C-alpha cells in the first residue's frame, strides 16, 4: 500500500485525478471503477479541466460505478447516475452507453445485482477502482458486518450512513434504506485501487482501516491485502498516520 498525505483537499484531488488520468492516457480503452460522494467531486472537476485543456480524452473509456440507491431511477437528482452525469459525464467526451451504474429502478434485487456483476466480468474487470471511505469504514455500501460480501448485492444501510447522507435530501425520511453495491470480492478484483479521504473526521477510520487489524467490522481494512493500492488523504485525514 502506498500512502500519500497531501497538503489540502485541493492537493489530494489533483493528485488523485493525476493517477486516474495517467491510467486513461496509458490505456485509452481502460475500465474505470468510479465512486460518488463529496470527496471525489474535486478530482472529477480536475479531470473535466484536463479534458477542456485537451490533455485527456474519455472517448474509449468504460466505467462502472460502485453503487446506487435501490428505488431511485437515474433521473432522480439524488441518484448516483445523476451525480456522475452532473459531475463528470456531461462535461467530457465519454460515450454514456459505456457508463454503468447499478439499476436502482429495478425492483428485483437478485436480477439487478447479477446483471451488474455479469457486465463487469464481460468487460474484463476493472482496471482501476476509485473508492471513498465512510466514517464507519464502509467502501461502496459495504457496511460493517460479520463477513466480507463477495459479489454485487443489495444491502440494508446503517443508521449512521443514512444520517450521513441525509444532508443531501430534504429530510432523513427521504433517504433510501437499501442500495445495490459492488461486493468486497468485486472491488478486490480490480487490478489497481485508489482511495481518497479528507477531513479531520476521517482521521480515526483512516488509521483503523489501513494500519489496524483486517476485519469485516472495518470493511476497508481488507484493502491491506490488495497488491496495488494507493491511498491519498489530506493532512487532516492523515494526521494519525504520521
Image (cartoon, helix red, strand yellow):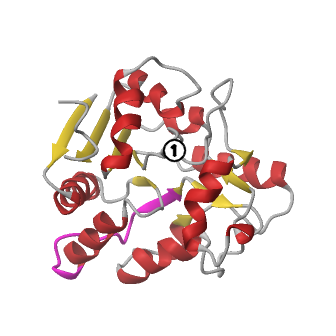
Image quadrant where one finds the C terminus: top left
Residue under numbered circle 1: 124
Secondary structure beneath label 1? loop
Count of all numbered marks drawn on residues in the image: 1
Tell me what residue is drawn at x 44 percent, y 45 percent: 133
Asked if residue 217 is positioned above or below residue 138 in the image, the reply reads above
Task: Give the residue drawn at x 28%, y 75%.
Answer: 48
Q: Tell me: 109 left or right of 185.
A: right
Examine the rendering and report whether any part of residue 231 can be seen. Answer: yes
- Dividing the image into 4 quarters, which one contains the N terminus? top left
Query: Residue visible at 67% across and 37% down?
Result: 151
Point out residue 145 in the picture as x, y percentages from the top left corner. 67, 30
Q: Is residue 70 above or below residue 4?
A: below
**Residue for point 72% across, 71% down:** 174
88 in magenta: no
Query: Which quarter of the picture shows residue 42?
Result: bottom left
70 or 8: nearer the viewer? 8
**Mark 1 crowd level (few <14, some 14–19, many ≥20, 10 Å Cα):** few
Whether residue 116 can be seen here:
no
| Residue 63 counted in the magenta span | yes
Q: Main secondary structure of the magenta part?
A: loop
Residue 149: x and y in percent read 66, 32
Residue 110 percent coordinates (x, y): 83, 48
Q: Which residues are magenta?
A: 52-64
Q: Viewer-proximal residue, 127 or 9?
A: 9
Q: Residue furthest top?
A: 213
Amino acid at each position: 500500500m502506498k500512502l500519500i498525505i497531501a497538503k489540502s483537499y485541493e492537493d489530494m484531488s489533483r493528485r488523485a485525478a493525476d493517477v486516474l488520468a495517467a491510467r486513461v492516457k496509458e490505456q485509452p480503452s481502460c475500465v474505470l471503477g468510479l465512486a460518488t460522494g463529496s470527496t471525489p467531486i474535486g478530482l472529477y472537476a480536475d479531470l473535466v479541466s484536463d479534458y477542456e485543456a485537451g490533455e485527456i480524452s474519455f472517448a474509449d473509456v468504460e466505467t462502472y460505478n460502485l453503487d446506487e440507491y435501490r428505488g431511485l431511477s437515474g433521473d432522480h437528482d439524488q441518484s448516483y447516475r445523476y451525480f456522475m452525469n452532473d459531475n463528470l459525464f456531461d462535461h467530457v467526451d465519454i460515450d454514456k452507453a459505456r457508463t454503468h451504474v447499478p439499476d436502482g429502478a429495478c425492483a428485483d434485487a437478485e436480477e439487478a445485482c447479477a446483471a451488474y456483476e455479469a457486465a463487469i466480468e464481460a468487460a474484463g474487470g476493472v482496471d482501476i477502482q476509485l473508492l471513498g471511505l465512510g466514517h464507519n469504514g464502509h467502501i461502496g455500501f459495504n457496511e460493517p458486518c460479520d463477513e466480507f460480501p463477495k459479489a454485487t448485492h443489495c444491502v440494508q444501510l446503517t443508521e449512521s450512513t443514512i444520517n450521513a447522507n441525509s444532508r443531501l435530501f430534504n429530510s432523513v425520511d427521504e433517504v433510501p434504506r437499501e442500495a445495490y453495491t459492488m461486493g468486497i470480492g468485486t472491488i478486490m478484483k480490480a487490478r489497481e485501487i485508489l482511495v481518497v479521504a479528507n477531513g479531520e473526521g476521517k482521521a480515526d477510520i483512516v488509521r483503523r482501516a489501513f494500519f489496524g487489524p483486517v476485519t469485516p467490522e472495518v470493511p476497508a481494512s481488507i484493502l491491506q491485502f490488495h497488491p496495488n493500492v494507493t491511498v491519498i488523504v489530506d493532512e487532516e485525514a492523515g494526521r494519525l498516520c504520521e
